[in-house]
Amino acid sequence: MSVKLHWFLPTTGDGRTIVERFHANKSRGPSAQRPADLDYLAQVARAAERLGFEGVLTPTGTWCEDAWLTTAALIRETNRLKFLVAFRPGVISPTLAAQMAGTFQRLSGGRVLLNIVTGGDAIEQRRFGDWHDHDARYARTDEFLSIVRGVWSGKPFDFAGDHLRVEGATTLAAPDPLPPLYFGGSSAAALPVAARHADVYLTWGEPPAQVAEKIGKVRELAEQEGRTVRFGVRLHTIARDTSAEAWAEAQKLLDALNPEQIAKAQSQLAASESVGQQRMVALHGGKAGTTARDLEIHPHLWAGIGLVRGGAGTALVGSYAEIADLIEEYHDAGVSEFVLSGYPHLEEAYWFGEGVRPELGRRGLLDEVPVLRAVPGERAVAAQ
């Protein structure tokens, strides 16, 4: 099976360090070098499309721009690129979500993918009026996705659960094709929901053996439901012409962090209810070490990002061939989709797209993607 590559839209702002992009909100510190305005995000999206990425993940949360609105604004800035829209089922009606996805699918020509984020931080959930506990959030997500799929059936749909209830839920028309559902979660409450509803189960970038173990659990649960699920991994990347150059870039990112930043971030992350976040923290234990390679937890897999960043905390670091080797290792473990990012996102998209992607192609791991060429006075079109 070939792999699909996705990139990331930095809707909190972007910069040359890990923490800078989280300071786009002035009340939280200095502004990012590159604010998340539409012109810059369009640059990143067009670069991802030109470089052959399947889609771009657009995150959800307090400190980023709304994913639905941002990606809708970028539809006409791109031609082929898909948008993996992250949203929280606890803060939106399932019928409205089904309607929004259908509208997006029709207006974009079938370019929406949905990333369901149940949420592992009780403090942030409460900002949005969600007072459910961890397991109840996943139970509600189960009902939410049952309703969404019921609405997409094209017939009025009734549902009465412990958390959600609808009568005659329907929309103008079912989206065609139905948007694939991407879903993550590592807890005992999350895995059965993934097995019942996910088209793609996403995990953060643990070492391949740990990812393979998690894949095995979800695959077994999905088989019990009579379903098959694809698997994806969320990672950062630092790809360069040589391994030494890549690790030098990782060292720059590490050197830009100070002990106070790390201590503050680790204190916040330790309070997370997310089992996946706890697994990320366990990879480095909150200790920065002296050199970047002190945090190499598997050949060319670096845990330094997770010292100050919640969620995806590991990066592929190395030469193009070395990163392709690690991607191939994940692929052998069952991963077919990779959602990637880097600092800054515009430049790193080119490092990966022009360096690693051809290497993966030579190994037979990529399907052909139309190369976009510019036409004077017009938007880019696919070359024949």
Image: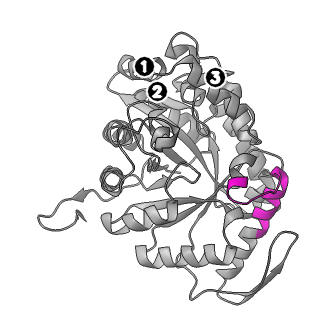
**For residue 272, which numbered disc appears in the image?**
none
Image vertical order of residue 131 relative to residue 335, above or below = below
Dot 3 and dot 2 residues touching (CB under 8 Å):
no
User: Are the two marked residues, 1 and 2, in contact with CB atoms closer than 8 angstroms?
Assistant: yes
**Mark 1 against mark 3, which lies toward the viewer?**
3
Vertical placement of 99 versus 366: above or below? below
Distance from disc 1 to disc 3, alpha carbons, whole Å, reads: 23 Å
Which image quadrant is residue 49 in?
A: bottom left
| Residue occupied by mark 2 | 317
Check disc 3 and give the amino acid type.
Ala
Query: In this rendering, does residue 121 appear at all?
Result: no
- Which of these two is toward me, 346 or 359? 346
Say which residue label 3 marks.
263
Distance, label 3 to label 2, CA atoms, is 24 Å
Identify the magenta region.
126-143
Q: Total number of numbered labels?
A: 3
Which residue is label 1 attached to? 247
Does residue 37 appear anywhere in the picture?
A: yes
Residue at image x 58%, y 17%? 288
Query: Which element type, helix, strand or loop, lies under badge 1?
Result: helix
- Horizontally, is 364 left or right of 121 in the view? left
Which residue is rendered at x = 49% and y = 55% of the image?
65
Name the amino acid type tagged 1.
Answer: Trp
Q: Along the horizontal axis of the image, is 46 left or right of 220? A: left
- Mark 3 secondary-structure assignment: helix
